[in-house]
Amino acid sequence: MADAGVSSALSSPVFQHFLVAISVAVILAPFSYYMGMGARILKLPQITGYLVSGIVCGPYLLGILSTESVVDLNIIEGACLSIIGLAAGAELHLSELSRSKKQVLGITFGISIATWVLCYGALEYTSGLLPKLGELDESHIVAVASLGATLMMARSPASAIAVLKEMDGKGPFSSLVMAVVVVKDVVVIIAYAINVELIRGSIVPSASAGSTPLLGMMLPVLSVMLSIAVGLCGGLLLSMLLRPHSLLGAVLPSMSPATTFKVKQLVILLVSTVIFNMAHYFEAEPLLACVTMGLFMVNRRPHLPARWVIRHDRADKEKEELHMMVSQIMSLTNVAFFGLAGASLKVGALKDMFGAALLVFAVRLVAIFVGSWLGCYTTSTSSEYRRLFWMSMITQAGVAMGLARLAGTRFPDWGPHFQTYMMAIILLNLLVGPPLFRHALVRVGEAKALLLPIKGSGGGAVAQQLQLGSILIKENGGGGTSLDGGLTHQHGHGHGLGDEDSPTKPDRDLDQ
């Protein structure tokens, strides 16, 4: 009886579709990877190559991946998105953020509010002119504009890290940029969750059937709280599994260090995928749950007495190891996620949307400039930063594309066209953003790779430090500086950013 059940399951059309999709994806993965390498040679973000490979192999060009195959691979896409969320949360170190919270929060909310308001107007205007989106009624247009404006607030942390690594960017400007970037992405994901619940309650009849107005108003808050609760449970479970005295820890000492590292990576991938799907099952926001899990993992160190400094050091090493493991996992999951994202794009619609995307892109540039200037002005930031800070806030990729993809699957009527529209705008930001950030670093004198001194640095003992997850940027009056992706770099000590041959240091994509 059991054998008959297993045989029936293996011969089912669903399983056959999934098996074929997995086989095709495994065959195409090397092609996507080398397309990413080619993009890197051309000084383009690696994920541009992954996206192009997905478009080429997708159902709208060569047809190697059919529409059914792309849908069948949603479970892989969920795993990739869970790692993107986990990595975004792991970048935010709350204890270090508190040192300059007024400046960081002022600039973050200045940029976020200006971007949402101006981009909402641009998206509401352009959505009505596009095929399919233009056929929607007024309430749907408002939903599209609100959701799109929320996505336009996002800025990729991994892209900022990659440019700082390339330029060896170190100093107060670089520190401030990283602080604003990671805080803003958390704000975006929370705002996205609220937007989705408001849309479901106002324009999706099945979601609001039988609910009272009061419950409808509370649903966005409840969804965010549920997402955070699921993420905290995931963070607690993951920390219990990875700690030395856990059941897993009892098995690992018998393995080699390399095998132990790989087993821990597999545990992280499995737990984050389970949490993502659990949040989806409970109709919470999966990406917010994974962000919360990452944030919990890097901020869970208890307040211990000074004599317990050994435990502090051990906790720091565990967090560095976590960042290294997540970074290496992302180097693989990015190939799959952005390849699938490219395969799901409607190429014909993308061509028709380019003009509208260009308009929204231009409006977003203006909005970021206005928001950055106002944020810097209200927090008494230097006039030079007011002029240049906006250049560091342009690039989008992993989080923005992940949210666009989630919207594409959550709202089947207009979601796929919305996703394609957002992808067109995000690609423009992805191509233009890194060169502008490099230019800003040169202007403020923090491009160490060009042998430029940090402006305003002297021989005194003044020191500024801001640590955000895997990023550690220190500025000492005449001493060392470091930008750390989970490892430490202090003028000849440790594995520095220029240490490309380090076997333990993952090489991040230009943008995640």
Image (spheres, rainbow, N blue to C red):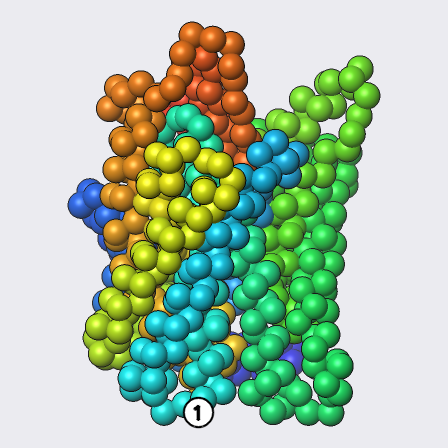
Q: Quadrant of residue 252?
A: top right
87, above or below 130, in the image:
above
Q: Nearer the viewer, residue 32 or 105?
A: 105
Image position, residue 135 (x, y; %): 36, 91
User: What is the residue that sits farthest to the top in this orientation?
Assistant: 459
268, above or below 321, in the image:
below
Image position, residue 328 (x, y; %): 46, 41
Q: Is residue 357 left or right of residue 367?
A: left
**Residue located beneath label 1 in the image:** 137
Q: Is residue 347 left or right of residue 276?
A: left
Residue 61: in sight, yes or no?
no
At 51% from the left and 9% from the top, the residue drawn is 461
At 59% from the left and 85% from the top, the residue drawn is 202
Quarter containing the N terminus: bottom right
Image position, residue 364 (x, y; %): 34, 60
Q: Quadrant of residue 204?
A: bottom right
- Hey, what amino acid is under mark 1? Asp
Residue 117: in sight, yes or no?
yes
Q: Is residue 293 left or right of residue 240?
A: left
Q: Nearer the viewer, residue 101 or 159?
A: 101
Q: How many marks?
A: 1
At 46% from the left and 20% from the top, the residue drawn is 475
Q: Residues within 10 Å of mark 1 (few under 14, many from 20)?
A: few
380, above or below 404, in the image:
above
Q: Is residue 141 left or right of residue 230?
A: left
Image position, residue 129 (x, y; %): 29, 84
Q: Quadrant of residue 424?
A: bottom left
At 50% from the left and 49% from the top, the residue drawn is 108
Report helix, strand or loop for mark 1. loop
Q: Nearer the viewer, residue 243 or 197?
A: 197
